[in-house]
Image (cartoon, rainbow, N blue to C red):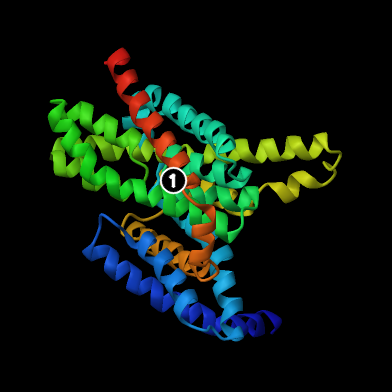
């Protein structure tokens, strides 16, 4: 009964998040270059700026921003079958792994130079290195980032996603890149999957197929990198003498279920006819979560942050794109 009562208290806020998430997904279908995630975050921020939200909406919006973010990651696992992607994309790891490392180092080093908060530079590095908003959503609960840090990092990543869709194909043609070269480059250097698909398929069908495989392989790095973040958090707790009982608290339950979902999908225990619906549910939960996150953020926070997040994102993105090209020349 208490659980039902708690959900009733969240009902109004959840309804707001659901309606705005549907609007964001509708807009995302018409403007795939931007995507539903960007629209959801913007709609949440606009809601907070223009509407005096009643207090009874806050519990549901806050719950969306935290819990639905985690559920979206779990359902994402069903669309990332490890065995299928790994069998085709392992050869790209010699490009992906170094570029992931370069992105992290660039974000951390230049984030310190521009005096970004630790969580913000970690999220920008994580999003640039692996797969944009999904990676940020997975890492944020582990490092206990707040809504402002999530919103700022996602906005930074999405800005460069949109630029990449227009810039990459033009550069590919100027440099006379083959379909294989462009697919490998865009798959390793563009952050979000939708932007990878938009850029690569505009280049050619073959480049698009190659880029998608590389991008999905890169996305799988969410798991080991998240586990690395968990290990680092546990180590720091141990160094500070707070390790007693900390390991259980540090390991997020949703990461465990994400791995389980991916394994179930890989070994064929999830019917293929169900997978598209699970993927849609993941997108819906992600959009609702971003509405909730956006509803706690104001434009004042973005103005206060200044140009530093964009500069760090730009440098990290440039390092990823440049290192990917250099490694291609070395290995192919």
Vertically, is 171 above or below 18?
A: above
Residue 326 located left or right of residue 30: right
Mark 1 crowd level (few <14, some 14–19, many ≥20, 10 Å Cα): some
Camera-side residue of 13 and 214: 13
Quadrant housing the C terminus: top left
Residue 187 image position (x, y, % from top left): 31, 36
Nearer to the camera, 176 or 283 = 176
Element on which disc 1 rests: helix
Count all numbered tags in the image, as a single digit: 1
Residue at 24%, 45% (x, y): give it: 165
Q: Position of residue 147 (x, y in %)?
A: 57, 60
Camera-nearest residue between 293 and 114: 114
Kindly identify the residue that appears in the image at 43 percent across and 49 percent down: 156
Q: Quadrant of the N terminus?
A: bottom right
Residue 166 shown left or right of residue 250 in the figure: left
Q: Give residue 206's position: percent from left, percent from top.
A: 15, 35
Q: Is residue 119 visible?
A: yes
Question: Which residue lies most toward the top here?
Answer: 330
The residue located at (81%, 34%) in the rendering is 239
Q: Nearer the viewer, residue 81 or 160?
A: 160
Q: To which quarter of the image does residue 38 belong? A: bottom left
Residue visible at 57% across and 51% down?
140
**Residue 55 spot, x, y in % from top left:** 61, 84
Vertical side of 301 occupied by 185: above or below: above
* Residue 121 drawn above or below residue 37: above
110 left or right of 141? left
> From where the camera sits, is residue 77 visible?
no
Q: Which residue is mark 1?
A: 310
């Amino acid at each position: 009964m208490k659980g039902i009562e708690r959900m009733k208290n969240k009902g109004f806020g959840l309804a707001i998040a659901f309606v705005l998430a549907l609007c964001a997904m509708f807009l995302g279908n018409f403007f795939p270059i931007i995507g539903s995630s960007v629209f959801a975050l913007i709609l949440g921020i606009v809601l907070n700026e223009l509407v005096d939200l009643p207090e009874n909406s806050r519990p549901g919006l806050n719950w969306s921003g935290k819990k639905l973010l985690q559920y979206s990651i779990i359902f994402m696992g069903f669309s990332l079958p490890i065995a299928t992607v790994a069998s085709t994309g392992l050869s790209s790891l010699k490009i992906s792994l170094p570029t992931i490392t370069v992105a992290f180092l660039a974000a951390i080093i230049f984030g310190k130079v521009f005096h970004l908060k630790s969580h913000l530079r970690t999220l920008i590095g994580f999003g640039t290195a692996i797969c944009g908003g999904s990676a940020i959503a997975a890492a944020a609960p582990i490092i206990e980032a707040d809504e402002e840090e999530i919103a700022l990092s996602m906005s930074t990543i999405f800005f460069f996603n949109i630029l990449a869709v227009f810039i990459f194909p033009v550069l590919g043609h100027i440099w006379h890149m083959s379909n294989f070269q462009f697919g490998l480059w865009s798959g390793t250097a563009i952050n979000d999957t939708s932007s990878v698909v938009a850029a690569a398929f505009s280049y050619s069908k073959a480049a698009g197929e190659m880029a998608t495989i590389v991008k999905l392989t890169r996305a799988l790095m969410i798991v080991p990198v998240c586990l690395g973040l968990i290990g680092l958090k546990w180590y720091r707790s141990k160094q500070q003498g707070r390790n007693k009982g900390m390991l259980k608290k540090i390991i997020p339950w949703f990461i465990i279920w994400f791995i389980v979902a991916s394994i179930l999908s890989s070994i064929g225990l999830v019917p293929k006819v169900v997978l598209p619906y699970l993927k849609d549910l993941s997108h819906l939960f992600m959009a609702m979560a971003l509405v909730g996150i956006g509803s706690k953020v104001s434009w004042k926070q973005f103005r206060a942050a200044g140009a530093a997040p964009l500069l760090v994102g730009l440098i990290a993105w440039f390092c990823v794109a440049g290192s990917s090209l250099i490694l291609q020349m070395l290995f192919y």
